[in-house]
């Protein structure tokens, strides 16, 4: 009480204890009223949620990249519990996490190998331009102008639509074309849908080499347009000891189930358009 | 037409007042660009127009509800008891509790809207723009110890609505501009937040022209 009376020196006038009491009572009353209301409403409006949803969400990667097609990891967890989504749609959750989710939901988890993305083009500055492009810097807008500024119909324009789309900062544009850093890529697939040329492809993480060109043009046309484009000579197909490379529509396709990473194709390619995945580590 | 609509539901404001509130809330007295309240979400949630619109609508909804509740609390509880100075404490308490309740009700009856507003609804609880409007609409004059309210309840609620829409307008405009500015070739030291501040500054200067409308 003595301490409270000392308060007078701060306030500068005698404390009106009635007003003080009313103020405290009003604040406490309002707080109590609001507390009771919140309690009542939370009882009335309780939403029953499957407890497994929270458990599954705890096992997911939690990056909220949206590549699975559901609104964030919580949306994906809900779809998993409902049985409307497949666990394979997420490329980021660890194998351990997927096994735990399988245990929670009582489903078998497929042993699919994780993938990473590569850009199937290495033209860039080596590939001729049809016209000089200046202005709004986006691949999608360039694509609208006569199919992009590159002479090659399947040439990376290097304007970085994929760079903007990547939530993991894995893509960089240098030497005139996009490179996916295999150490950062989580294969979410957002760049695949962002690229107007559809140049970004998925390969298994164990893959050492990839074909860095996807032009379907004849060798003569490629020769005149690009210094590093595939001319469909078929040398890689002949060199491969495991019969893993085949030309389809003038593009070499590697069958990674047969590839032993012997590097014969990479060493033999006259145009240097079969590349090491590890070359793109920034 | 707006006036007829309001009269038909029991409100009876002067038509000129309604017009003045609309102009003040959206343009001449814009809560962000003229009064500089609520800058935090203005810069924080304006990366994409979609999320900016969500934030703006959440702020508008909370502002209206705040005005509906805090005005009667002030007029009928705090003023008769002579403790007007407690307004800020009581308002913060009431606003926080209301948003909590609103969130639970939305979760039950409108899960779609709940997930659309998402994190923005609890975020606006402690926004200074909300408290600023709650303070603004309870403006009063004291003549011989008698307190006279400057605004009626109807006017207070309308102000909550249009100041909220003014907030939405400003944040969506900035979000649209930021998307374009991010693509431009600007000096590295200005990229990101600095250029956003400069953009916001020019927006505020442009909106200052509207203060002449008063």
Image (spheres, coloured by chain):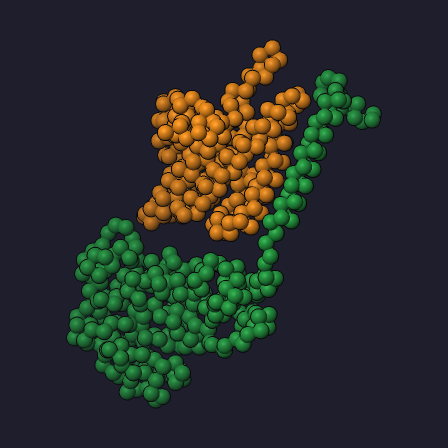
Chain colours: A green, B orange
As drawn, the residue found furthest toward the front would be B8
Q: Residue furthest right?
A: A2
For image coordinates 22% across by 61% down, the residue present is: A147
Figure check: A117 above or below B66: below
Residue placed most toward the observer, A241 or A266: A241
Q: Residue A14: which quarter of the image?
A: top right
- Where A26 sits versus A211, above or below? above
A105 with respect to B213 (left or right): right
- Residue A59 x, y percent position in the rendering: 57, 65
- Which residue is nearer to you in this view: A90 or A129? A90
Quadrant location, the C terminus of chain A:
bottom left
Q: Where does residue A66 sit, x and y in percent of width and height?
A: 45, 60
Taking depth in this image into account, of A52 and B171 the one nearest to the observer is A52
Q: Is residue B194 above or below residue A158?
A: above
Residue drawn at the location 39% of the way across and 85% of the way down: A258
In percent of the image, x 36 and y 34: which residue is there?
B202
Percent x, y of residue A84: 48, 67
* Residue sitting at x 45%, y 41%: B56
Residue farthest along the top direction in this orientation = B144
Relative image position of residue B38 (x, y in whole percent): 49, 36
In this picture, residue A128 sits left or right of residue B104: left
Image quadrant where one finds the N terminus of chain A: top right
Q: How many marks?
A: 0
Residue A279 in view, yes or no? no
Tell me if I can see residue A143 in this picture: yes
Q: Relative to residue A281, is residue B83 depicted above or below?
A: above
């Amino acid at each position: 009480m003595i301490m409270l009376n000392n308060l007078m020196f701060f306030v500068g006038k005698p404390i009106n204890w009635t007003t003080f009491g009313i103020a405290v009572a009003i604040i406490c009353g309002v707080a109590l009223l609001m507390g009771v209301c919140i309690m009542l409403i939370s009882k009335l409006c309780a939403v029953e949620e499957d407890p497994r949803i929270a458990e599954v969400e705890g096992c997911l990667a939690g990056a909220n990249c949206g590549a699975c097609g559901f609104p964030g990891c919580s949306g994906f967890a809900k779809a998993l519990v409902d049985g409307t989504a497949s666990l394979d749609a997420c490329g980021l959750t660890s194998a351990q996490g997927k096994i735990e989710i399988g245990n929670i939901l009582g489903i078998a988890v497929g042993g699919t190998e994780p993938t990473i993305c590569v850009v199937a083009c290495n033209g860039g500055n080596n590939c001729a331009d049809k016209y000089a492009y200046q202005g709004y810097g986006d691949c999608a807008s360039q694509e609208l102008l006569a199919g992009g500024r590159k002479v090659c119909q399947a040439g990376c324009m290097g304007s970085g639509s994929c760079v903007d789309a990547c939530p993991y900062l894995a893509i960089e544009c240098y030497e005139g074309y996009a490179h996916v850093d295999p150490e950062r890529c989580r294969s979410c697939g957002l760049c695949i849908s962002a690229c107007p040329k559809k140049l970004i492809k998925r390969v298994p993480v164990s893959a050492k080499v990839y074909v860095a060109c996807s032009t379907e043009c004849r060798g003569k046309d490629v020769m005149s347009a690009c210094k590093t484009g595939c001319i469909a000579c078929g040398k890689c197909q002949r060199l491969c000891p495991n019969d893993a490379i085949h030309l389809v529509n003038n593009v070499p396709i590697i069958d990674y189930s047969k590839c032993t990473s012997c590097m014969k194709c990479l060493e033999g390619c006259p145009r240097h358009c079969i590349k090491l995945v590890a070359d793109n580590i920034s | 037409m707006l006036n007829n609509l309001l009269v038909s539901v029991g409100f009876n404001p002067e038509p000129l007042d309604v017009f003045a509130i609309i102009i003040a809330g959206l343009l001449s007295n814009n809560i962000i660009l003229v009064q500089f309240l609520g800058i935090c979400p203005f810069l924080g949630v304006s990366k994409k127009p979609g999320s900016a619109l969500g934030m703006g609508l959440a702020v508008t909804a909370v502002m209206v509800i705040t005005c509906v509740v805090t005005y009667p609390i002030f007029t009928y509880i705090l003023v008769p008891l002579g403790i007007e100075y407690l307004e800020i404490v009581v308002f913060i308490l009431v606003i926080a509790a209301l948003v909590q309740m609103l969130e639970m009700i939305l979760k039950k009856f409108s899960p779609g809207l709940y997930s659309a507003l998402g994190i923005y609804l609890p975020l606006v609880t402690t926004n200074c723009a909300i408290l600023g409007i709650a303070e603004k609409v309870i403006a009063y004059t004291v003549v011989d110890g008698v307190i006279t309210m400057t605004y009626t309840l109807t006017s207070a609620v309308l102000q909550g609505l249009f100041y909220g829409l003014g907030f939405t307008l400003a944040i969506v405009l900035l979000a649209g501009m930021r998307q374009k500015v991010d693509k431009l070739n600007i000096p590295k030291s200005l990229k990101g937040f600095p250029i956003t501040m400069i953009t916001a500054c020019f927006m505020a200067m442009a909106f200052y022209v509207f203060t002449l409308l008063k």
